[in-house]
């Protein structure tokens, strides 16, 4: 596994040249809540060519985190310097609204990008998404539910698609219904309602319930010693996608790594993620 990651990292040596950038912060992509804001990191490149975009979604147990967190701001700057339009989004947390508000907000941010594609020279057919932990849950769900109107919410630009063309998810809750010991406290807070229907609500919030043959490319990153999200979650999701016939799915399992695998192993995970998106979105 590590040798594969090293190969992916080496591929970046011949990647796109770095470009200057500008940043637009706290842009409203919807109007229902002050949480519905995004930061845009834009390559300062001349010409008329359309650029791919990446949507970064923070973690925090669906109850914390912020789009300006150091790791995500740093990644967004890195991607914009490499020629991507990088977007870091906030979304309504569970204290403000239960599921599906969180995925509806992420979907609204993608539709907003398509609505403003000409303004920012975004190729609407080359949008990727990346997240960790709760953010990974949301991007994993995002990649499979473009045709699930019950998850779109009532935000603007409903005439546009929320589909993405590539997903990278790290430490991902994929199956809340079959969580060891049952859905945890955060999941129960995210999915309020009668106890007798909790598992059905958990199923509707689980990316694994939506796997399909025409899934976009997925890169799953997981630590084998994650005490927060069992490795079996990523493994089962990977297996389900492959069984459904999804042609481009990858699982990178790091022996001994914990819930912070994306950052702790960043010398390997970050280049692997870049190589994955370059391959999926720059073809």
Image (cartoon, helix red, strand yellow):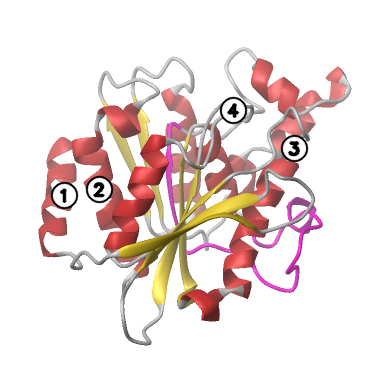
Q: Residue 40 vs residue 93: left or right? A: left
Q: CA distance from mark 2 to mark 1?
A: 6 Å
Q: Is residue 39 above or below residue 92?
A: below
Q: Quadrant of the C terminus?
A: bottom left
Q: Residue 144 at x, y = what percent?
A: 59, 54
Q: Which residue is mark 1?
A: 9
Q: Is residue 269 above or below residue 196?
A: below
Q: Residue 193 at x, y = what percent?
A: 86, 25
Q: Is residue 78 visible?
A: yes
Q: CA distance from mark 3 to mark 1?
A: 37 Å
Q: Which residues are magenta?
A: 146-171
Q: Is residue 160 located in the magenta-colored stretch of the structure?
A: yes
Pointer 3 and pointer 1: residues touching (CB < 8 Å)?
A: no
Q: Which residue is mark 2?
A: 272
Pointer 2 and pointer 1: residues touching (CB < 8 Å)?
A: yes
- Mark with earlier residue (3, 1): 1
**Looking at the image, which residue is at 48% across and 41% down?**
68
Q: CA distance from mark 4 to mark 3?
A: 15 Å
What label does residue 122 carry, if any? none
Q: Is residue 212 above or below residue 165?
A: above
Q: Secondary structure at mark 3?
A: loop
Q: CA distance from mark 3 to mark 2?
A: 31 Å
């Amino acid at each position: 596994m590590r040798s594969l990651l090293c190969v992916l990292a080496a591929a970046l040596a011949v990647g796109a040249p770095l470009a200057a950038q500008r940043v637009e912060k706290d842009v409203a992509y919807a109007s229902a809540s002050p949480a519905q804001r995004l930061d845009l990191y834009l390559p300062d490149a001349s010409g008329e060519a359309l650029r791919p975009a990446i949507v970064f979604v923070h973690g925090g147990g669906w109850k914390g985190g912020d789009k300006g967190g150091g790791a995500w701001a740093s990644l967004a700057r890195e991607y914009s310097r490499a020629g991507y339009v990088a977007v870091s989004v906030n979304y309504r947390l569970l204290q403000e609204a239960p599921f599906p508000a969180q995925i509806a907000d992420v979907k609204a941010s993608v539709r907003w990008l398509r609505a403003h594609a000409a303004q920012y020279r975004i190729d609407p057919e080359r949008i990727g998404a990346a997240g960790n932990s709760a953010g990974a849950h949301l991007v994993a769900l995002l990649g499979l539910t473009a045709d699930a109107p019950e998850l779109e919410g009532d935000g603007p630009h409903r005439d546009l698609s929320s589909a993405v063309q590539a997903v990278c998810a790290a430490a991902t809750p994929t199956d809340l219904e079959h969580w060891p010991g049952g859905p945890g406290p955060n999941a129960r807070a995210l999915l309020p309602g009668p106890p007798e229907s909790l598992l059905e609500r958990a199923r509707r919030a689980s990316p694994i319930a939506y796997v399909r043959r025409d899934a976009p490319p997925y890169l799953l990153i997981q630590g084998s010693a994650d005490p927060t999200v069992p490795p079996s979650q990523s493994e089962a999701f990977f297996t389900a996608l492959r069984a459904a016939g999804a042609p481009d799915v990858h699982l990178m399992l790091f022996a001994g790594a914990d819930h912070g695998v994306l950052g702790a192993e960043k010398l390997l995970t970050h280049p692997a993620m870049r190589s994955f998106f370059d391959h999926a979105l720059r073809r």
